[in-house]
Amino acid sequence: MGTGGSGTRGGLRATALLPSAALTLAGWVVGIVVTAMILGTPYLVFGYHNASLHLVLESIDGCVALLVAYLLYGRFVRTRRLQDLLLSEAMFLLAVAGLGLTLLLDLLVDVRPATLNVWLPLALRVLGAALIVAAAFAGRRAAHASVDRWARITPWLVVALAFGLLWFQRDQLPVALPDLPPASAQRPVITGHAAVLGAQAVTALSFMAASLAFAVQAARREDELLRWLGPALALGAFARVNYLLFPSLYSDWLYTGDILRTGSYLVLLVGAAREIGQYWSAHARAAVLDDRRRLARELHDGVVQELAYIRSEAHDLSSRDGSSEQIVAACDRALDEARAAIDALGRGEDEDEDLSFVLHQAARQVAERYDGHLEVDLDDSVTADSEQRHALVRITREAVSNALRHGKPDRVHIQVGRDPNGRRLVVQDDGEGFDVDTVEARSSGYGLTSMRDRARALPGSLTIQSKQGRGTEVTVKW
């Protein structure tokens, strides 16, 4: 399971309560405040001896990391991005390090306490942090094709290799942490092997750098999981800082570092839940798009072909009372409607062209049908969303068709631009013109009611100016 991340639109972005920068800043603030409280309030007790709760939190963290690793691997299968692969393998290593690995190694015979059961999880966590930093700066770079065959087995090989190297050196491994209760549960106690302290510091700095990098990327990309990586890594970074102050990661004592670490994984869990929602929303949109395209094919192969046949037959009739001309005109309008529906149904959100392009294309199709002369003046910087674009295309088709069929102009001029009040579309001709009040009073012909309704839905307005013998000007503002 997974999504392409940046390829999704709309729903989840609209439900986002805070921008990614604000979420990441919140993670940093929480980490700084908690750490400052430890350093500045010597009368508060921050440590509790509870081996069961320590194991429960570690297992929860590992399960969340495993879920995120699975989602990220699914994204990699879809996107082939190196970033997704590196993050997936990093989360897998962190999951293995947290899923009771320390407890399992404690059960091995001939292993001194606080050696292999500390150094192996620590090595996996440092490797995971290094992969996260690499992923943060990999961006959208594509993974090499040769990576695919190794993607699934590489993290297992890393775990096996790390275990093998440390196992054969188990007798020479130094004691990582003293097997003693902490000297104080109220003041920081920096103790343990220098390599352990250094590893925690490196991991903290790595998470901090990755947190900032992911926050910047999430601000540019519509990616729910990346959006929550920034605050999660910020909390994870300060968890490592707290492990420097109270070395509780490999003991039965519970300190603020453990709470911050679990908070980090809970934030990741929120990101994973939103990623899953994004995945199913994308599937629903894809199913709707498939149905729309199927309906567009049916319209094209059925209704449009039959209308084209009726038009060709009616055109060849030797009409006595002008009925064939009316039939041809009706067929032309029906064909316009059917082709507009096919264009709207067959085009996905990511396939929408520029507004200027689709308006020019729609007007040209109508002008060619009536052998009209078309002039365009289109500002490419004027934009519209997909629904507005569809409404403007229909208005343009109707206005150009009306001008060519009824006004008999020498030219039709289309303009798209901006004015101080917003954007505007103008369809102007030099034809015969008509009495607007009379036509609107009859509420029939020319599709004026439909055009006004579409303009109001933009939201916007439509005005028509016309005089007998002086042409017509249709203006839409939105």
Image (cartoon, rainbow, N blue to C red):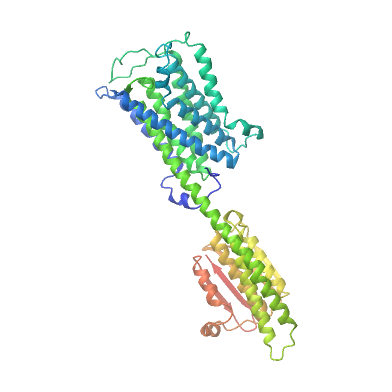
| Residue 340 position by quadrant | bottom right
User: 249 or 446, which lies in front?
Assistant: 249
Q: Position of residue 407 (x, y in %)?
A: 66, 80
Seen as rendered, the residue at the extreme top is 172
Q: Position of residue 158 (x, y in %)?
A: 54, 23
Residue 475 left/right relative to 50: right
Image height check: is 320 above or below 290?
below
Q: How many marks?
A: 0
Q: Give the residue at the far bottom of this rendering.
A: 320
Viewer can see residue 373: no
Q: Nearer the viewer, residue 224 or 314?
A: 314
Q: Position of residue 133 (x, y in %)?
A: 52, 29
Using the rendered image of the protein, determine whether residue 160 is visible from the camera's viewpoint: yes
Tell me the residue at 69%/84% (across/down).
325
Decide if residue 375 is on the left or right side of residue 114.
right
Residue pictured at 47% horizontal, 52% vertical: 11
Q: Nearer the viewer, residue 288 or 203?
A: 288
Q: In the rendered view, would you say 416 is above or below 134?
A: below
Q: Residue furthest left?
A: 43
Q: Where 101 sits versus 360, above or below?
A: above
Up the image or down, 373 lies above or below 1; here it is below
Rendered location of residue 261, percent (x, y): 39, 30
Please identify the quarter of the rendering in which residue 64 is found: top left
